[in-house]
Image (cartoon, rainbow, N blue to C red):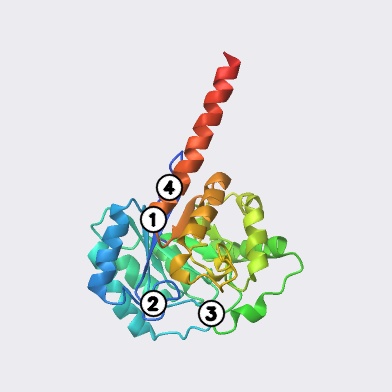
Amino acid sequence: MTAAASIALPQRPEDRPLVMGVVNVTPDSFSDGGRFFDAAAAVAHGRELVGHGADIIDIGGESTRPGAQRPSVEEELRRVIPVIEGLADSGAWISIDTMRAPVASAAVAAGARIINDVSGGLADPEMTSVAAQTGAGFVVMHWRGHSHDMQTRAIYDDVTADVCRELADQVGAALDAGVSRDQVVIDPGLGFAKTAEQNWILLQHLSAFQQMKLPVLVGASRKSFLSRVGSRGDGPVPAEQRDFATAAVSVVLAQAGVWAIRVHEVRSTFAACDVVRHLREATAGASQGAQE
């Protein structure tokens, strides 16, 4: 099969990042505990996120929380395809969150236009071929291994430089496989083979990823490194209560000018982006006034 024409990635609005809403069709998600494992519930949740303004809906059938066990390919397909088909007319871009080439291929055939591979093409050697052949957007995330042992691999000399270098190698492998550069989005992979401190360092150095001259997607939503944000000494903040911290991080991401933010709760993300927009408008207005 020859490579297909690339599906143009959605354009980032001038005043905010794109917002990617998460739909986990899994029984063991760290963030929502299987609330949307039923296909009808997942479709309804996806439509709710679109109603709240989500530009992209990211549908996943495999939990990537630390220690998670992998479903079979057949089970992953059973989980995600009906949801993709149910959201195909929602008006949002559909993204398939998978590390498996057969799932990605079937998902694009069902209506997905972005392949969000948290392994960045490393878990399945056929994934880059599927991206090339379908022309779908291809999110290449920094990755060092599967969930069952990824946190043992969080060893870096310089986390920002090392992640940028390894991510560049992953992008290079995708391009060598026939993926077009205009299909590619990069993701630093917060929480994947990263300690809490390393995640914060990467957030401090987002400009290093933007220097790669590719759209940057960041997913910090409800991740464990946020579990101490807002805690008052009474233990870690549970995942479902981390949306306040997520919104605060979204302010940082919007200020940095990333291409898209991946989140579970869409409305607070738009509020965060609006804060940044109002500050920029106020600053521009003050500058204009000073010149008159």
Relative to residue 211, is residue 79 depicted above or below?
A: below
Left or right, 59 with reference to 290: left
Residue 234: give its label.
none
**Would you call the spot at circle 4 few (<14 residues within 10 Å), some (14-19), or many (20 or more)?**
some
Q: Which corner quadrant holds the N terminus?
A: bottom left
Q: CA distance from mark 3 to mark 4?
A: 30 Å
Residue picked out by circle 2: 33
- Mark 4 or mark 1, earlier in chain: 1
Note whether residue 21 is visible.
yes
Q: Amino acid at mark 3?
A: Pro
Note whether residue 16 is visible.
no
- Mark 1 or mark 3, earlier in chain: 3
**Which mark is nearer the camera, 4 or 1?**
4
Residue 66: give its label.
3
Q: Are marks 3 and 2 in contact (CB under 8 Å)?
A: no
Q: Are marks 4 and 1 in contact (CB under 8 Å)?
A: no
Q: Amino acid at mark 1?
A: Val
Left or right, 48 with reference to 136: left
Q: Tag 3's secondary structure?
A: loop
- Mark 3 or mark 2, earlier in chain: 2
Residue picked out by circle 1: 266
- Mark 2 or mark 4, earlier in chain: 2
Relative to residue 154, is residue 114 depicted above or below?
A: above
Quick one: 259 or 273, which is closer to the camera?
273
Residue 271: give its label.
4
Left or right, 157 with reference to 47: right
Q: Tag 2's secondary structure?
A: loop
Q: CA distance from mark 3 to mark 2?
A: 14 Å
Q: CA distance from mark 2 to mark 4?
A: 25 Å
Relative to residue 155, is residue 94 depicted above or below?
A: above
